[in-house]
Amino acid sequence: MEFINTYLPNVVTFWDYIVKAIWETGYMVSLSLVLSALVGIPLGVLLVITSKGHLKPMPALYQVLSIIVNIFRSIPYIVLIIILIPVTRVLINTSIGPNAAILSLVVGAAPFVARLVETSIREVDKGVIEASQSMGATTWQIIYKILLPESLPGIISGVTVTAISLVGFSAMAGVVGAGGLGAMAYNYGFNGFKTDIMIVTTVLLIVMVQVIQMIGDVIARKLDHR
Amino acid sequence: MIKLTNIVKEFKNRFGTFTALNGVDLDIQKGDIYGIIGYSGAGKSTLVRMINLLETPTSGEVLVGDTHLHKLTARDLRKARRKIGMVFQHFNLLWSRTVLENVALPLEIAGVPKSEHKERVNQLLDLVGLTDKADMYPSQLSGGQKQRIGIARALANNPDVLLCDEATSALDPKTTDSILDLLKDINSKLGLTIVLITHEMHVIEKICDKVAVMESGRVIEAGEVVEVFSHPKTTTTKEFLNQVSGTEQISDEFLSGLGEGAVLRCTFLGGSAGQTVISRMITDLGVQVNILQGQIKRLKEVAFGTLYVQIQGDVDAEAKAVAYLKKNGVIVNVVRGAEGGSN
Ligand SMILES: Nc1ncnc2c1ncn2[C@@H]1O[C@H](COP(=O)(O)OP(=O)(O)OP(=O)(O)O)[C@@H](O)[C@H]1O
Ligand SMILES: [Mg+2]
């Protein structure tokens, strides 16, 4: 206690704020992760099956999707936040707070998820797809009985990587008004010259990343029977 | 049961057109174990994939049972495929599913009520002799066991036809034999028609009733196994026959160490049952025969192979023996003539 009071005085004073910031970051990361997965996974599946020589080749659609994904992946996140401020305002009537960051986080992360999912699904053995076709499976059955289960460990790893990126992105969003640990570090730590807060919030972000990675690895390993 | 008529398959790419199948006709009867043999690239896989339309013909007709597969809608084709099981060289099992779930996959796809899966899967695992492996994952099984699961899975919806694309090519000889025995067993138990692709004569010899020999996208010989291999017409067929009959030569050293008398190489190709011809010759002609080296194989009821024999005696004995053997359908080469010999 003595030690904490001496070396981390502001952390003690602002502890309640820090706890709130942890929750805000957790909220932003988990909600945007779920939404990114909901958008990104189907998009990844589409990117695979519409490509040449796959289940439903549709070259035009594939090209369009691929270009859109690339565009959103190449816009720097900080620019994405600024571009999306007006849209956010229309949607939820405000451009600050954790909810305001969700849209830009999802727009930034979903294309990333889509590409990672695409890569994982492409690794599914062609022979297995062929076997299911020989059994008379529909495209839909092939997707949810073969492609997704067989690439699940890869998808989980992809989602884990995305979650970690989202921790970083959400910290950046924090700087422009979304709250969370990033905002805490910037507003109190950097601008407010409270070095101890900057250090502690940074350590908390690192711990968060480690925990996410660990959970992701454990799940992926559990699911992998190769 | 299966009738392919004038099947042509062309693969187009940016460099041009490649004709993988060039006017293939195939007529497979119900209950047959029909082998298709050919070298790599002959078009065997392409041909067998025509039978469930995994590969669509550029032209020609595919008749399975009394359904023209190529005329079906996508929906009806999927339904028809449930009655055509397929087994693959690399098994193609889902590693994400247990053995039980793998075998149940075709049932799920066909919409069989979940409550019936377990019983059906257990029947199938019993048939292939792997009931104790139901809850394992494919990665925990050996190649032979994986193929048994592949076969169980292919049989799940009670198909009328089983297609096997190199089903044993990834397995060692002993495991190959056990899988072939299983296929034969299934064929007689379930009355299933089996189409089997291979590049190994051993597979044909062991279980097939009929055979088609393929080369560069064509069937060059086809018919009863015994018929085709007792009167091989093409070099390719003869080469495949050699796979099982052996072509070893007799060494010169061994020859020079032999006593007097002609040395003959007798090649049996079907028709003549080797050993009986030799023993009948011994009694009929009263000659002494030394069997030096050779290999006689049986393909169904037909013997074929090569024997090196030494005929004791002079030129006369040699001539009589050669004539006798030739009359009985044996191909004779004189390796070394008798003393004062004719050649
Ligand atoms: N999708 C394809 N596109 C282009 N060419 C193809 C395609 N599939 C097969 N071929 C060609 O058709 C020919 C026959 O192929 P196929 O796979 O039927 O041979 P195979 O007799 O089964 O040989 P293997 O014993 O090696 O399996 C080969 O020359 C192959 O390159
Ligand atoms: Mg092949």
Image (cartoon, coloured by chain):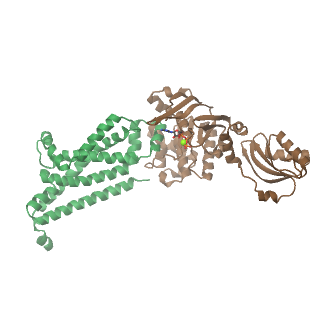
Chain colours: A green, B brown
Q: At which x and y percent is residue B312?
A: 88, 52
Q: Between B156 and B236, which is closer to the camera in this rendering?
A: B236
Q: How many marks?
A: 0
Farthest bottom residue? A2
Q: At which x and y percent is residue A105?
A: 21, 48
Q: Is residue B133 shown left or right of residue A115?
A: right
What residue do we see at 31% from left, 57% from top? A215
Q: At which x and y percent is residue B4?
A: 57, 30
Q: Between B341 and B203, which is closer to the camera in this rendering?
A: B341
Report if residue A95 is visible in the image. yes
Q: At which x and y percent is residue A76?
A: 20, 49
User: Where A30 falls versus A68 (above or below)?
Assistant: below
Report if residue B136 is visible in the image. no
Q: Between A162 and B12, which is closer to the camera in this rendering?
A: B12
Q: Between B119 and B97, which is closer to the camera in this rendering?
A: B97
Q: Considering the image in quadrants, where does the N terminus of chain B appear?
A: top right
What residue do we see at 15% from left, 73% from top? A3
Res A214 quadrant in image: bottom left
What residue do we see at 13% from left, 49% from top? A97
What residue do we see at 77% from left, 39% from top? B271
Q: Is residue B225 shown left or right of residue A109?
A: right
